[in-house]
Image: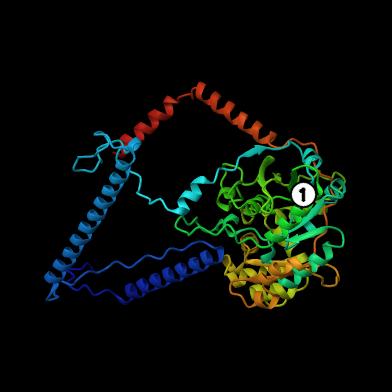
Amino acid sequence: MPRIRKKTSRRGTTRQREKIKHKVSEHRKKTKKQARKDKAAGKLVQKKSKKDPGIPNNFPYKDQILAEVEEQRRQAAAERQRRKEEKRTAAAGNDSNDPEKSPTPEDIDVDEKDGQGFDGIMSLRPAFIPKNKDNIAQERIPAIPVFAGPSTLRDVVQKADVVLHVVDARDPAAGMSDALAEEARGKLTVLLNKADTVPRESLVQWLAHLRTSYTVLPFRASSAFMPSGTPLEPPNKKAKPMPKGDALGLAGLWAYLDDLAQTKDSEELVVAVTGVTNAGKSAVINSIIGSDVFSIYNAHMASSAKGPSTTISAQEVVATMPSNDTRRIRFIDTPGLQFVRAASTTDQEREAMRARDVLLRCRGRIDRLKDPLFGVTHIVARADTQDLMLAYSLPAFLQGDVTGFLAGVARVSGLIKKRGVLDHVGAARVVLRDWCTGKLMRYSMPECTPEWTADGDTAVLGSVRSRKELRSAVEVKLVKMDAGVSDKRDLEWDVVWGEDEEEEEEEEEESDGDGEEEERPVRPEKRKVSFAVETERR
């Protein structure tokens, strides 16, 4: 029967109210679930700031408060204008003292808009900086020139008097090369870099183990030459500059190089710095010289498609000994070691070698690999099971059981798909992200070796935390790994560095030039159809 009387009540039915409640509940559940997934994936969630409601209209003293606020704003604007005038006057007075930089009538701005109508050059005035002793000392320091180095690894080793091989202290054996040790026999020195990323017990045992075969020195680069931030964090432009003279083991390294220079007849000592990719070779040279000479690895640059993220060709820089200004030392920064690909290997061996190389070099966003499971398989096979359980708060799983480990990580991180299916790939990306950012703090122990330290290691070992201190640290997942083995593959001795990059640049330039000359064909039929569709829509 049709409704005769018009509906006057706005009260809804119970069915409508329950329907709205159900929609709100489902929306909140969905939002919370997405927030948990974003937090597990490491995404930065920006919370919406609440808007200031202002002063209520029925407040009795609203007009007085608004007048006070307006007066404060006016005073602040006047203060800013006064400071701007003082700076302008100081800059003009500083320029007037110098006859060569005396202002001309064109340089003086008499417009009321303070030069806003110009093209942006005349309106930009340098800030007045008082000349003190520190500024004068910085101006007198000359720039350190950088020269092109040898083109191949063989030429570098033959030219060098000392081959300083940089390895990662977290897994030193994996960064060694039998071919390089054989070629540079008698002048190879191992530098245990990143000494502050491992427990003190591990560092002591590795020093004693490697010193049975080589000369080994512990080291940690200066804070100013360490990679700033992670690929997940945006670069902080307002961060304070880090110190350049806080390197650990720098005094022992200079003393060792000074002793070698005294035994040599010539006045110049040539030191070649080698190592795998991202071992910290450029950062070591910058820390030794105390200046930002070579560009270091940048996580944000590595995640982008343009520009190299590591050293691509050999470069040389000359410095003087701190103890004797007449003696010079020439450092040669080299790209990462390139190994010859083994031909007679099985698919399983190639997969394990690929996982080893990717995890050792840790170049770029390895968590974005198309198939991240092979890397986690290598980690679980080498890592201690109990340490993994404590690091990720997981239930017990069998030794080397990758499926059980990833299932536990997926449950803890909330990576569950529809119908309760666990997201193993997402869990593998979480583990690789922790590995790449250093949150998964790993270390290894060599074979049974008696603890033995030199006198110069006291300063470095005193700054390194013990295993107990690292386990109690916040946001650190300390995991013990099985020690790696030295690489048995041969090296690319005669491959010229930088040739591939030059060929790629030439191909890009040729393709760009061809694209400029050729004209793209126009399809009038498609244009007619789209115009007709737009006309109908209008």
The quarter of the rendered structure image containing the C terminus is top left
Residue 323, compared with residue 33, is above or below; it is above
Helix, strand or loop at mark 1: helix
Answer with the quarter of the image where residue 225 lies: bottom right
Answer with the quarter of the image where residue 328 lies: top right
Q: Residue at x 45, y 24 (%)?
A: 522
Residue 383 visible, this orientation = no
> Which of these two is toward me, 416 or 85?
85
Residue 234, compared with residue 156, is above or below; it is below
Q: Residue at x 32, y 74 (%)?
A: 17
Residue behind mark 1: 261
Residue 494: % across, % down: 80, 36
Residue 487, compared with residue 408, is above or below; it is above
Residue 487: % across, % down: 82, 53
Answer with the quarter of the image where residue 41 lies: bottom right
Residue 362: % across, % down: 67, 55
Q: Residue at x 28, y 44 (%)?
A: 92
Which of the colour schemes (rainbow, by chain, secondary structure, one colour) is used? rainbow
Q: Residue at x 59, y 71 (%)?
A: 475
> Which of these two is toward me, 80 or 21?
80
Q: Is residue 284 left or right of residue 538?
A: right
